Image (cartoon, rainbow, N blue to C red):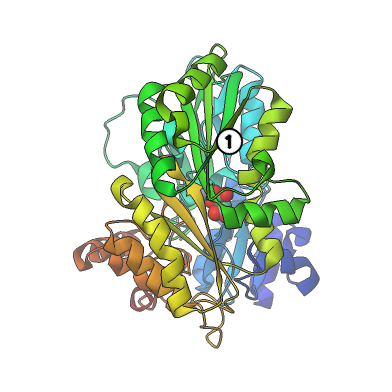
Amino acid sequence: MDRLRTSLADVVGPSHVLVDPELTASYETDWTGRFTGRAAAVVRPGSPGEVAAVMALLHEAGRPVVPQGGNTGLVGGGVPLHGEVVVSLRRLAAIDEVDVAAGQVTVGAGATAAAVDDAAARVGLAFGVDLAARQSATVGGMVATNAGGLRMLRYGGMRAQTAGVEAVLADGRLVSHLGGLTKDNTGYDLAGLLAGSEGTLAVVTRVQLRLVPRLEHRTTGLLAFADPEAALEALIGLRRRLPGLLEAAELFLADGVRLVCDHLGIPPPFGRIDPVYLLVEAAGVSDPTEELAAAVIEVVGDRALDGAVDAEPTGRARLWRYREAHTEAINAAGVPVKLDVTLPAGELAAFLAEAPVTVERVAPGARCILFGHAGDGNVHVNVLGVAGGSGVSPDMTDARPVEDAVLRLAAGRGGSISSEHGIGAAKRPWLHLNRSPAEIEVFRAIKRALDPDGILNPHVLLPEEDARTGALG
Ligand code: MLT
Ligand code: ZN
């Protein structure tokens, strides 16, 4: 490693090859604190050319690599659980001038979601993907995980925003297709392939993003319900009644709100804790408040126990924090097992009822908090009070029964075991619940074609036996 370290330092400069545990620590543990490892080194290239040179060196040395962005991933896909070298892309944060005519911008993989949105705002545009981790999550990581977030309902996820990509292959070759043409049928869609590849196929260095119109007029509504069925029926009505206006539809429950209120020291909505909440946001070129309020009266009516609609930024933020503070409130209460699943629309209410019962059966006394993006059928199942998980050290396997039961429950109802967080290290043993042997064989063939030596994130996404086919150095 010493000679390799010197060669890496020749490329990126000695201050960007970190081996001191104090300096590497923040790159070695994920945001939840559940996934932690030791990096052989952390390398911080400052340009796509440096990424290419770094990868060429690591490839020659046969060193496994974990590419890392803002380290906000939640499935252990961006931390060195097996002593890999971390290649941090955070220094690639440049944002080119926005191409107003095309409604696009090319950004470095290390640019954060918030920085991209700020740049877009300066010309009246917006970044179509928004998520609570916006200040830290980087575009490269968001492409690699095909991030979804809060506006998926209206604009789709990262794959839909990605007009072009530049990436470095495992052996250091740079591939780039940043033309950004709306119509461009010239072969395989590399950007589409890399979206959701979780760092296993290439290291994303630059991304050409599609931007969306910036809608300055927005109104947020928070509605309380007695049960999930009532909330979901109300959502169906609102979606039909407000086509093209609804931007977010988030669902959360009493337990989560209790946790948020305790954590932030704030009173519950409407002065009491209700069983189910639906938060909706409408956005348009003119003020959507009246339309949203009318829709709530017409299609929700007395299905709701209570409700509030607010168009003022502070009032909207006050409503949003009951939803957005879930993640930090849960983490403040302990290290959660996080399972991010999608259900078909017709199965969502049944899953919300069954998940806590299932968790209680396999982990009596554990706390199950459910929230998510109701408009996408996406439920975030967070379980507190369980020691470890399949991605952490082998002796901490208490979470396995919980993971197994919840993922099987979702898949059994026709759902996906990974809605937006990815498979990562956490869910690879269950990939077969959603993907057939033939599909996994195709995945493996693609992996071999792009990374024949298996050095790129070898312990992520594909089941274990596939990862072992690579020379791990
Ligand atoms: C969210 O929707 O808030 C994110 O996916 C984060 C989380 O699941 O905790
Ligand atoms: Zn989410």
Which residue occupies 37% across, 30% down?
A: 237
Label 1 amino acid? Val
Q: In the rendered image, is residue 154 in sight?
A: yes
Left or right, 45 with reference to 365: right
Q: Is residue 30 above or below residue 274?
A: below
Q: Determine the image quadrant of residue 255.
A: bottom right
Q: Position of residue 359 (x, y in %)?
A: 46, 72
Q: Position of residue 92 (x, y in %)?
A: 64, 44
Q: Residue furthest top?
A: 286
Q: In the rendered image, is residue 179 in sight?
A: no
Residue to which mark 1 is pinned = 107
Q: Residue furthest left?
A: 438
Q: Position of residue 157 (x, y in %)?
A: 44, 40
Left or right, 45 with reference to 252: right
Q: Is residue 124 above or below residue 88?
A: above
Q: Is residue 173 above or below residue 403?
A: above
Query: Which residue occupies the foreground of this view, 422 or 201?
Result: 422
Which residue occupies 40% across, 26% down?
A: 299
Q: Determine the image quadrant of residue 328.
A: bottom right
Mark 1 residue element: strand
Query: Which residue occupies the foreground of this view, 217 or 290?
Result: 290
Q: Determine the image quadrant of residue 153.
A: top left
